[in-house]
């Protein structure tokens, strides 16, 4: 089992580069299933979930290669297995993203039903209902979704009862090769959805309205191969900016895009941070002490649920009392008890956490439970005086490329121990 060991209390300073976004790369890789030619991907991060997805595509029969500039090329023309078996995808919930592309290309698909995870049940009922509107016959057998579209998929008008990011992405991809027009209403507006739509358009898809809550797709016969560019990881970016703020430091993240983080930057400014931005960088310098600020997670452009745990860690040492409300997932407060072990003063009241800021956190052994909770524990660890040991760090490796290396480049005393 691997752990991350941190000697905290050092103000973090300096600059670190953002990686490509995990939550953009996963749908982009799935989109290769639609392409009638090789697709070269630029800025795909090296993360466990990405390997799971590329291994799955190779297993389906695609040709998957990395060149000497670390560029990934995937050619799915030879793929002939429209499946995603449990054994291959059980660690990656985003496997549902191959369902729409496989179904519209092969007329059938068998994809393991994603299990829940620590933060919630994570159903995909909205994905399946939308595919049925497009003509699919769906059943669930032995833990797999069995989808059939013997006459292909046709367009339709789809209203998502709840904003769903991968639901929007899955159906967007299915609609690209479906017959006729598809309109997605109450669609997700996340930057990763726009990155996917931009990329599909570059390969020949006809898509309008991405970035708004209504997306219209005109089905086409085929889309070609080509080059696809992943946007910066806004969640990773904000995590390193938070590391500077929670330690009283001054951190710049480069190769990123401030336009991806409007809600987060507005809140940290409210908390007293000095924020400087340019075309491709963001700098956050800490005030003498952060001020308590309330947040309420919402679909984009609201405050991202994926930054809730990291923001809470900052509020643990802020001056005053803050309220953090989680409206997207039903169980995304697993980090609270671990932060309390480190001296935080947090009371839970349903989907709202009440955080009374303390002067200092105290280092302690803690346990990661999910990806973003583990990031918040690393943030608490770099802030706390003494040695913090974060165990079960396989969670963090799913979403943060070379986290110790990047944190060390900012002056953190952080190591990975294999025990
Ligand atoms: C994506 O998950 C992200 N993952 C998540 O990031 C992110 O937290 C989430 O969007 C919200 O922004 C990827 O993009 C790979 P949803 P997704 O469908 O698409 C309910 C991280 O830390 N819902 O937008 O699975 C669902 O239960 C991860 O990087 C249904 O009820 O999330 C949730 O309450 C964690 N039925 C809400 O909608 C459905 O069919 C939003 O979920 C689909 C979703």
Image (cartoon, rainbow, N blue to C red):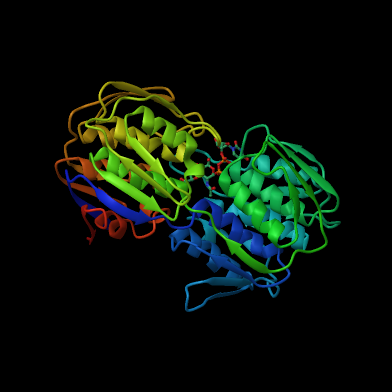
Say whether residue 289 is left or right of residue 25.
left
**Whether residue 268 is situated above or below residue 236 in the rendered picture:** above
Residue 350, percent across and down? 42, 22
Q: Is residue 370 visible to us here?
A: no
Where, by quadrant of the figure, is residue 84 drawn?
Answer: bottom right
Residue 355, percent across and down? 31, 24
Taking the image in four quarters, ligand 1 sits in the one at: top right
- Residue at point 26% right, 58% down? 409
Say whether residue 226 is left or right of residue 294.
right
- Residue at point 63% right, 33% down? 162
**366, 312: nearer the viewer:** 312
- Residue at point 46% right, 61% down? 45
Say whether residue 38 is left or right of residue 303.
right
Where, by quadrant of the figure, is residue 177 drawn?
Answer: bottom right
Where, by quadrant of the figure, is residue 29 drawn?
Answer: bottom right
**148, 167: nearer the viewer:** 167
| Most distant residue in the left direction | 386
Residue 237, percent across and down? 41, 48
| Most distant residue in the bottom direction | 68
């Amino acid at each position: 089992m691997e752990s991350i060991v941190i000697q905290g209390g050092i103000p973090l300073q300096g600059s670190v580069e953002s990686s490509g976004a995990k939550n953009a790369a996963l749908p982009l890789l799935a989109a290769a299933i639609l392409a009638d030619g090789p697709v070269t991907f630029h800025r795909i991060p090296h993360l466990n979930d990405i390997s799971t997805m590329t291994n799955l595509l190779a297993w389906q029969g695609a040709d998957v290669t990395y060149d000497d500039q670390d560029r990934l090329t995937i050619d799915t023309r030879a793929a002939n297995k429209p499946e995603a078996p449990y054994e291959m995808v059980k660690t990656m919930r985003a496997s549902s993203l191959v369902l729409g592309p496989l179904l519209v290309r092969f007329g059938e698909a068998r994809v393991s039903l994603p299990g829940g995870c620590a933060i919630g049940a994570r159903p995909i009922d909205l994905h399946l209902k939308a595919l049925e509107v497009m003509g699919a016959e769906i059943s669930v057998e032995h833990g797999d979704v069995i989808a059939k579209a013997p006459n292909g998929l046709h367009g339709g008008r789809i209203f998502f009862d709840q904003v769903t990011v991968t639901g929007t992405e899955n159906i967007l991809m299915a609609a690209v090769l479906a017959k006729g027009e598809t309109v997605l209403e109450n669609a997700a507006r996340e930057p990763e959805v726009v990155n996917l739509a931009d990329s599909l358009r570059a390969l020949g898809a006809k898509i309008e309205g991405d970035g708004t809550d209504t997306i219209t797709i005109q089905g086409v016969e085929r889309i070609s191969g080509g080059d696809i560019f992943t946007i910066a990881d806004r969640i990773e970016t904000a995590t390193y900016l938070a590391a500077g703020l929670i330690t009283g430091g001054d951190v710049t993240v480069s190769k990123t895009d401030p336009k991806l983080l409007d809600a987060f930057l507005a809140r940290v400014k409210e908390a007293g941070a000095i924020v400087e931005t340019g075309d491709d960088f963001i700098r956050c310098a800490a005030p003498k002490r952060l001020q308590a600020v309330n947040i309420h997670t919402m679909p984009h452009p609201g405050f991202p649920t994926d930054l809730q745990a990291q923001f809470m860690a900052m509020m643990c040492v802020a001056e005053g009392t803050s309220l953090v409300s989680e409206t997207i997932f039903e169980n995304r407060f697993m980090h609270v008890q671990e932060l309390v072990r480190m001296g935080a003063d947090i009371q839970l009241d349903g989907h709202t956490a009440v955080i009374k800021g303390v002067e200092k956190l105290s280092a302690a052994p803690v346990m990661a439970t999910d990806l973003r909770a583990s990031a918040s524990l690393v943030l608490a660890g770099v802030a706390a005086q003494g040695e913090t040991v974060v165990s079960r760090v396989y969670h963090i490796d799913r979403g943060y490329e070379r986290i110790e290396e990047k944190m060390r480049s900012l002056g953190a005393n952080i190591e990975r121990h294999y025990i």
